[in-house]
Image: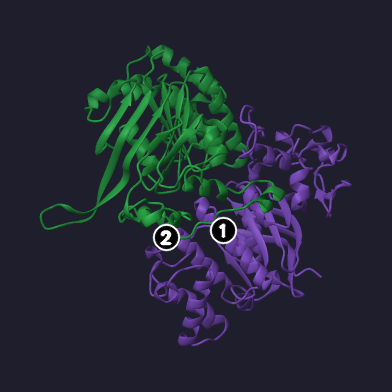
Amino acid sequence: MAMLSVRDLTVRFDTHHGNVRAVDGVSFELEEGETLGLVGESGSGKSVTNLAMMGLIPQPPGVIEKGEVLYNGRDLLKLAPRELQALRGNEISMIFQDPMTSLNPLLTIGQQLREVLEIHKGQKRREASKHCAEALGDVGIPAPESRLEQYPHELSGGMRQRVMIAMALLCDPRVLIADEPTTALDVTIQAQILELMKDLQKRRGTAIILITHDLGVVAGMSDRVHVMYAGKLVETGGVSDLFRAPAHPYTAGLLGSVPRLNSDTSESLLSIPGAPPDLADLPPGCAFQPRCTISTEACMHTEPPLETVLDSNSKSARFVACPSSMRRDPAFGGKS
Amino acid sequence: MSSAPLLDVRDLHKHFPVGEKGLFGAHKQLLKAVNGVSFSLERGQCLGLVGESGCGKSTVARAVVGLHPATSGSIRFDGNELVGLSTRGWLPYRRKIQMIFQDPYASLDPRQTVSSILTEPSKIHGLSKPRERKLHAMQLLEAVGLNPRHINRYPHEFSGGQRQRIGIARALALEPELLICDEPVSALDVSIQAQIINLMGELKERFNLSYLFIAHDLAVVRHICDSVAVMYLGRVVEQASRDEIFNDPRHPYTKSLLSAVPVPDPELERARERIVLEGDVPSPLDPPPGCSFAPRCPWRHEVPDDRCNREIPELVERDGRKRSCFLPLAH
């Protein structure tokens, strides 16, 4: 059985511009020890999905319309705030994108780290300090004992992100949600942080949900990939199948838009025409249809459901929300 | 065609005084953001200036357009010295050198219509007749792929990608020769990024432009640039043609940087060897005494006598490419 399963999650925000469904009927499962990549452009709903799972959507303006998030047979969406708090940062923890703003500037690194252990494990100061220093050492921070006395502004961006990771891992979580964990960092630091996450996962068997817009990061880290567009999952599959032969035209467009270090530079990049839709004013039918090159009359009326991809070369189950893609050979995209 | 490069930067320094003033009014510390940068850009070419945050690449850009006066060094545009020019002396070059900024939200005045944004430059420079200006603005919008009928709208009515197009149209309004592009696509979503990169490629041919293209995304730079200068902590550590840099990097930092870029291909990404550097970029307030990359360089021990930690390597030209490193070339 899956460790964590999300079923039909739907989150709405009531704004001045109208009611916006940021997440619309998203379902997925997370297995022990795997990394699930969640990709999509800004506004596609990937962060909201995870904030909703953790009970971190401010209500109002947010409304969880329906869905369930099952973890250990319990629905996280129905837990009392106190019960959820006992899980958060303990069995399920998060790393946020911006290491500059996710640490409290008024507290030392030690105070912020110790708090986690004091709350969840009931440890005393001395014992907690020892564990915190070990955790900082684990994420490759030199001289961890003296870092505990420092304030966030005394550390560089890469160091702060490591502190965030150390904090997220303090209680040996079973699930780690990493929301753009390296987006704010330079590539050489990003490489360090990603190595670190892989290493920790190998040692502790943590399941990771990796939210990112960087397809290179997904390619290196994930076992499976879920692609979101306008609040919905549009394609899911094993990482190599999906990169080799993207089935949804949006996935194909996304992969084609990325310049690579080995692509032919004399050709223009494939780009997706237009811009992501306004969630308050979605087109009828398939949300991607106005930008799609293979859309048909039917796409303008019916919302396509997620269906199994018929690809004989696939190693794992694949789903796509595009009936038009079914008629083609799914190996059309990939590396031609 | 003249043989002089369009832009020739020699030993450029830009130092910022920081911290509290001391007893006699002098600042206690000097942040050497740009510390002896040299490069040149030929007419019609695109030079990529790459490096990580804090390496000084944006400061170089700002010095070239005169937003930060250089501390010392020389910036020659078409053979004319720009360093030390008066405000009035700058005016003709402001027209020829224009800039595209990173943030399409912050770089357009929210209270100006697109029409006003696009006609203001020629108004200031007294270029065309008032009647012609609006027509010209509409032509510019068309050139960057926007609907000319939207000319009376305000920036907030456009998406991020569309705003970046307006920023590009504004830069083109004065028919410049050189565009300084400071991270022009890094704030945009992937699918929009590709549109803007393609547009910049088209415009370069159509209007005979040269680009100084500043970016941290190496794949983007490889796609659009003809040559590349790699910066680290205020200095250029390697400059060569695009293919030389990407196929045969010779500075340890360039090698590490290239190896750190994740490749969007699962098999390749998992199979390749990666150089994972230790530590962080040193503070420019307290740079290491020798080569600024030495503390993180995986090969520093291969140079005898700890030379990397004691001596600053010069940018030396060899086989038409430049590099600043003590390691033997065959490395």
From the viewer's side, name the closer residue of A260 and B163: A260
- The quadrant of the picture occupied by the C terminus of chain A is top right
At a point 51% along the width and 80% down the height, the residue shown is A131
Q: Is residue A22 visible?
A: no
Q: Is residue A155 left or right of residue A324?
A: left
Location of residue B170 with respect to A135 vertically, above or below: above
- The quadrant of the picture occupied by the N terminus of chain A is bottom right
Q: Position of residue A192 (x, y in %)?
A: 54, 59
Q: Is residue A274 left or right of residue A189?
A: right
From the viewer's side, name the closer residue of B212 and A188: A188
At a point 59% along the width and 46% down the height, the residue shown is A17
Q: Position of residue A180 (x, y in %)?
A: 58, 56
Q: Position of residue B38 (x, y in %)?
A: 35, 35
- Secondary element at tag 1: loop
Mark 2 highlights which residue? A156
**Chain letter, disc 1 residue:** A
Q: Colour of chain B?
A: green
Mark 2 residue type: Ser
